[in-house]
Amino acid sequence: FSENGIVTVSGGALGIDSAAHEGALSGPGATVAVLGNGLGHNYLPEKVFMRRRIQARGALITELMPFAAPAVSTFPRRNRLIAALGQTVTVAQSDRRGGSMISADYALKFGRKLFVFSGSVYFSPGCEKLISSGAVPITDAADVLACYGVRHVSVPLENDGIGLPRILAPEACTLEEFAALNGATPAEIRPAYEKLLARAREAQTASRQPQVKKQPE
């Protein structure tokens, strides 16, 4: 979506929300996080770096007071805004009840196109319920992009063959920050972090080497 200019709107939470935002931030596009708390409340502190990057590349929005804490009632309000902001709504996975189903209900109420992952991707009771109610089953991003008039899907982003996107240059953050941004523990991410850090330092050293022109004999 990011490679094709689609803005991704999600809820800034753990799991699929974070994956959606990180995917958007890995490309040239923008992303919007609709929060179930006030902007002054540090909900999910492990995602503070992600929220800073979203703010720089998109927006953090909420209709709650600045220091309002999240509560059971604030998340349905957030899901209402998510459904209202998008031209389409996609449900990746859900039980028969939950926040995603609330978003889906609002999407139908607002006349938005509702997509859900089909059972051929993985089984989800909520998605199966929505399909039986008329939602459009999808298997990949191209199915959604076609709704926006995008017929060509760009080549997936490179990730240096180490299985992780280059979310932030390693020389610009600590190991702990890099782990948080990539959704991994410091122990899991250390090999990739050190590999990218060494590569970045080599590139910096090479750029500082004076260029000596060879004199003609």
Image (cartoon, rainbow, N blue to C red):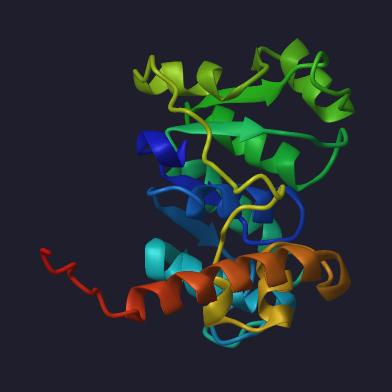
Image coordinates of residue 19 in percent, x first then y, are 67, 50
- Number of callouts in the render? 0
Residue at (72% x, 63% y) in the render? 192
Whether 204 is drawn above or below 91: the answer is below
Residue 174 in the image, given as x and y percentages of width and height: 65, 84
On screen, residue 210 versus residue 40, left or right, reads left
Q: Is residue 55 above or below residue 39?
A: above
Question: What percent of the width, then of the height, locates residue 89?
Answer: 56, 33
Question: Residue at position x 38%, y 49% from top?
Answer: 28
Q: Name the foreground residue: 207 vs 54.
A: 207
The answer to which of 59 and 185 lies nearer the viewer is 185
- Whether residue 61 is visible here, answered yes or no, is no
Residue at (67, 79) in percent of width and height: 177
Choose top left, top right, bottom left or bottom right for residue 135: top right
Q: Is residue 91 left or right of residue 64?
A: right
Hey, which residue is sitting farthest front in the picture? 217
Q: Is residue 136 above or below residue 201?
A: above
Res 93 → quadrant: top right
User: Can residue 113 be seen?
Assistant: yes
- In this rendering, position of residue 188 left or right of residue 65: right
**The C terminus sits in image quarter:** bottom left
* Residue sticking out furthest to the left: 216
Residue at the image point whose x is 74% and y is 47% from the top: 99
Give the camera-side residue of 8 and 130. Answer: 8
- Horizontally, is 45 left or right of 157 in the view? right
Residue 38 drawn above or below residue 141:
below
